[in-house]
Structure formats: C-alpha cells, structure tokens
Image (spheres, rainbow, N blue to C red):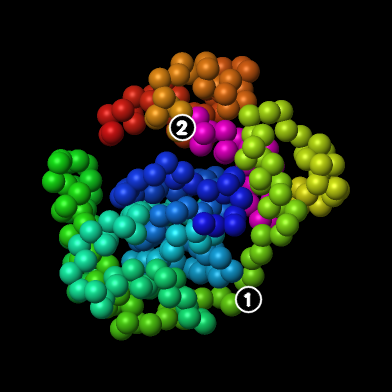
Amino acid sequence: MSNYPKALQTFVDPFLFQIFVDHNEGDWKMPFEWHDSLEIFYTLKGKGHYFIEDKFYTFQEGDMFIIGNNELHKSQLIDGEPFEALIIMFHPKIVRMLQTDNHYNPLTIFKERPPGFSHQMKMNQDDQIIFDMISKQLQTEFELNRDDSMCSIVSLLNWLLVLINRQYEKEKQLPSLNPKYSFKLNNTISKALDYVNENFYKDLKLSDLAENLFVSPSYLSREFKRVTGFTLIEFITSKRVRHAKNLLTHSYLQITDIASQVGYNNVTHFHLVFKKIVGMSPGEYRKYVSKID
C-alpha cells in the first residue's frame, strides 16, 4: 500500500477495469493523486505537462504514459490549452486471468523502475494503428457490459500490454525527461492532507489548520499550493465534490442529505459549486451515471 495521504487517493471503489476519455480545458486543475490500479494514459489531442513521482514530462498527441499503482502523479495544462487523453485503468489480477506463459509477465513495464526510467513512450505508426483498434474494441466491450465482456477485455488487454512492452523495448527511453524537477511530499503537507481527508465536511480554516500543525498560515498556504496546485479552500472543495459524486453514484440519499454530509448546509450553494466543477447539477449527474452503469 502507498504511504501517501488518503486525501490524494482517487478511484477508491474497487474495480477490475475502466476505460474513458478525459477532457481537460479552461481553468481545469488536477491535484496530485494516487490509486491502487495500473494506468495507461494516451494523448489523443493537445499537449501538457505530466508530473509522476519526482519526474517531469512534456507530452503531445500520440504520447503514452505507463503509471504504476500507488505512483503519485498529476497532469497539467500548458498556457490553458486543452488536451484529451484516453485513460485505461485496471487491476493487475485481470491480466493474470490469461496466464499462458509463466516466463513472460506483461506487467513488467509497470513494475521495473531502473535508474533513468521514463514513464513516457510513443508508438510507431504501425503499432499506433493496432493500439487504436484494440482500445476502441476495449471501449466497446466495456460499454456493452455483457456476461462475456470481461473475457474479451482480458484478452484484448493482454494483447495491448504485449504491444506496449515490445514498443518500449524498441524505443527504450524518450529524451523529454526533465531531471531538474524534484517533488517531495513534505511531512507538514502530508499531515495537512490527512487532516483534510478526515475533516473535509467541517468548516476548515487555514489559520486553524496551521495552528494544529505548528506552522505559520503563510507557510502552509504557500506549500499547500506548491504541492497540490490548489489553495486549501480549492482542495477542500475538490474533495467534497469527489465525495458527493461517489454518494450520488452509489447511494439513494437525497441530494439535500448528500450536501449536508459533504459539508454544505446550504443546498443551493452546493448545487452552484457542484455544477461549476462537474459541469452539471447533482441531479443531472445522478441521472447521467445511472444511464452508463
């Protein structure tokens, strides 16, 4: 398990496989995050920056990232320009469902981190055509959700991983790694994030949190923004909305009750905040997720 604060963990509900297109634009910001699943990030359009553990990358259309479980990471817009990425996330055990050769492990690329390892790679033109074909079929099977869909997904995912491993062996490392960037989650911010995770539904103030951690408010404010990319209030709001989305998806609670559980006594304010971040009202979001389940 990761030693990172739970406040940075995403996708906390267990799942075997997910695939979706991530659209990022405007004033979108992503905090550092980690999760137990493995991830393939493939850039469909645009460009951006990617921070993974203590490494910094610049990416563009066609670039791929191989992100291990529990690796701290976040993507970032460049000059506000939008980008789209295909995200494939999966539990390692579904790959082992089709273990035909005990001497070959398609997950090696996620596990081995030799000095100078780059999470970034680019498919050659021929392999990119195959990748596009496999990923589209994975999306189709995921959306069909038939009794036999997981069998197809496991086979397609293994094929995809073999393709990626072969391409990585050809390309080895991309020269875009910036070794000057260094990221460390210091003890104060780690404790702050743990506190936020346990108390996000309360009326949290920067001054009170700083006093609790025995640091000045200005230091906490500066370091919190540097590490997460958010002010404390922005991060708390992000945490509340993420929790609200989970409750809207997996519970039958009334929206007024959900608002109260995530820290909003005023349901109108909750509606405004939720819609600003998610792009739809809580009620609209609940209807949307019920259709795709």
Residue 204 can be seen in this image: yes
Residue type at tag 2: Lys
- Seen from the viewer's position, the closer of residues 175 and 244 is 244
Quadrant in which residue 202 is drawn: top right
Q: Alpha-carbon neighbours of circle 2 within 10 Å: few (<14), some, or many (≥20)?
A: some
Residue identified by numbered label 2? 245
Find the distance from the CA under tag 1 to the CA under tag 2. 37 Å
Which residue is depicted at the point 84% across and 49% down? 215
Q: Which residues are magenta?
A: 223-245
Give the answer, above or below, for where 54 lies relative to 138.
below
Which residue is depicted at the point 43% across and 75% down? 112
Quadrant where the image shows the C terminus: top left
Residue type at tag 1: Lys
Which residue is depicted at the point 51% across and 61% down? 71
Is most of the magenta stretch helix, strand or loop?
Answer: helix
Residue identified by numbered label 1? 180
**Furthest residue toward front:** 102
Q: What x and y, as percent, mark residue 127?
A: 22, 72
- Which element type, helix, strand or loop, lies under badge 1? loop
Q: What x and y, as percent, mark residue 18?
A: 32, 48
Q: What x and y, as percent, mark residue 218?
A: 83, 48
